[in-house]
Amino acid sequence: MTSPANSTSMEGLNRELDRELSAALRSRGHRVTLPRLLVHRHVRRRDGHLLPEQLHAELAAELPSLSPATIYATLDLLDALGFVRRVGSPRGGTIYDSRTDPHHHVICRLCGHIQDLEAPVDMVSAERAAAAAGFAVHRGELQLSGICATCAS
Amino acid sequence: MTSPANSTSMEGLNRELDRELSAALRSRGHRVTLPRLLVHRHVRRRDGHLLPEQLHAELAAELPSLSPATIYATLDLLDALGFVRRVGSPRGGTIYDSRTDPHHHVICRLCGHIQDLEAPVDMVSAERAAAAAGFAVHRGELQLSGICATCAS
DNA sequence: CTTTTTGCAAATGATTTGCATTAAC
DNA sequence: GTTAATGCAAATCATTTGCAAAAAG
C-alpha cells in the first residue's frame, strides 16, 4: 500500500517542512516549538495570502491554546527567516504571503481580495532613485488597486 | 509694499484653495464647511505625506474642536474628490499623500519614513495581468521598502 | 426649515505588552 | 537548571459608529 508517492503525502510533507524550519531556527539560536511548527506547516501548505486572525481560527482545531500573540510573533519570525512575506494591505491590517519570490499584487479596494501578478516589472530606475535618496532598498512590489470581478457585480 | 507676488501669499493661496474645494464640493452636493476648508488648506499647502493623527495635532491650534472622526471623514472625502491619495503603509495605519499624480514610494521599514520616487515604472503588463484576472484596475504604485539614511546610522 | 456635518464618547478591530507558567535545550 | 517561548488578560493604537447638537443651504 505504500508507494513512492508517499514522500509527498501530508505526513511526509509535514516532516520535510518541519526539518526545514528546525534547521533555520537552530541556525539562528531559536527554539523549535510546536506552535512554530504548526504555523509554518499551515502557511506553507496553503499557498496564498492569509490574515493572522484567519490563521488563528484555522489552527484552533490542532492547538486550541494557540494565542493571537503567538501567531503574530511567529509570523514575524517566519518573515525574518524568509519563509513568509509581510505585506501591508492598503485597507489596513497585515497580510502574510506564503510566496517569498518577487511578484506583485492586485487588491480589491472594496472587499480586500488580493491576487498575485506574475508580470515582470522593471524597478531598476526606481531602485536607483531610492538609493540616491539614501535608502538601502530591501525589496519592492507593485501594488495595483481596483475592483475584483465579484465586487463588480 | 504689495507686489504681484501677493497672489501667492498665504491669504491669497488659501482663498484660491478654498475656491477650488468649494467648487468641487458643491458640484457633488456636499456642503462647504470650516473643517473641510482647513483640512484641505493644510494638506495642500504642505506637500508631502501625512498621518491623520499628525494632521489632527497640527490643526488643533486653528480649530481645537476638530475631532479625529471629522479628520478621517474629511480625508476620505478629499480622496474621493481627488485632492489627496490614500496610501496604505506597509507598517499599518494609513498615510495620505498630497500628490495625486502617478508616482512611487520608498518606505523605511524601521521608522516608517516615506519618500516619493519619480522614476518611470512600466506597469502595463501587470495591468494586463490584473485585467485578465477580472480586476478593473484603478491605480497602482510601486512600493520599495528598505532602510533610510537616518536609521542606517 | 430641512438635511448634512460635526463633536463627542463609546465601540471596534488589529496588534502589542507584561508577566507568570511552561517547555526547550 | 537556565533561558526562551507561550498563553492569557489587559493595554494600546488607529479607525469607525451612534447620536444629539450645531451649521449649511
Image: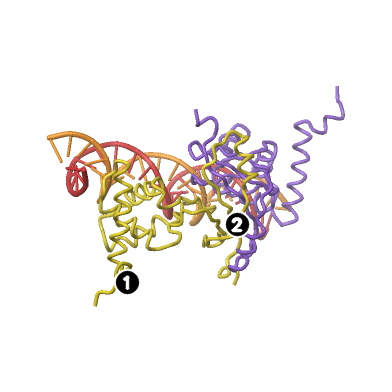
Chain colours: A yellow, B purple, C red, D orange
Q: Quadrant of residue A106?
A: bottom right
Disc 2: which chain? Answer: A
Amino acid, disc 1? Ala
Quarter of the figure that contains the N terminus of chain B: top right
| Along the line of sight, the residue nearer the viewer: B40 or A39 | A39
Q: Provide the secondary structure element on which disc 2 rests.
A: loop
Q: Which mark is residue B128?
A: none
At horizontal 25% and vertical 74% (from top left) the residue drawn is A2
Disc 1: which chain? Answer: A
Total label count? 2
Q: Position of residue B16 (x, y in %)?
A: 78, 40
At horizontal 67% and vertical 38% (from top left) the residue drawn is B47
Q: Tag 1 or tag 2, which sits nearer the N-term?
A: 1
Badge 2 local density, few (<14 within 10 Å), some, or many (20+)? Answer: some
Left or right: residue D12 compared with residue B40: left
Q: Which residue is mark 2?
A: A120
At horizontal 63% and vertical 54% (from top left) the residue drawn is B140
Left or right: residue A81 compared with residue A1: right
Q: Which mark is residue A5?
A: 1
Placement of A45 over or under A4, stated as above or below = above
Q: Position of residue B3 (x, y in %)?
A: 86, 26
Q: Provide the secondary structure element on which disc 1 rests.
A: helix
Indicate which label's residue lies in the foreground, 2 or 1.
1
Amino acid, disc 2? Pro
- Is there a contact, CB below 8 Å, between mark 2 and mark 1? no
At horizontal 77% and vertical 44% (from top left) the residue drawn is B19
Structural distance between the alpha carbons of marks 2 and 1: 34 Å
Badge 1 local density, few (<14 within 10 Å), some, or many (20+)? Answer: few
Q: Position of residue B118 (x, y in %)?
A: 68, 43
Which residue is the extreme one toward the bottom? A1
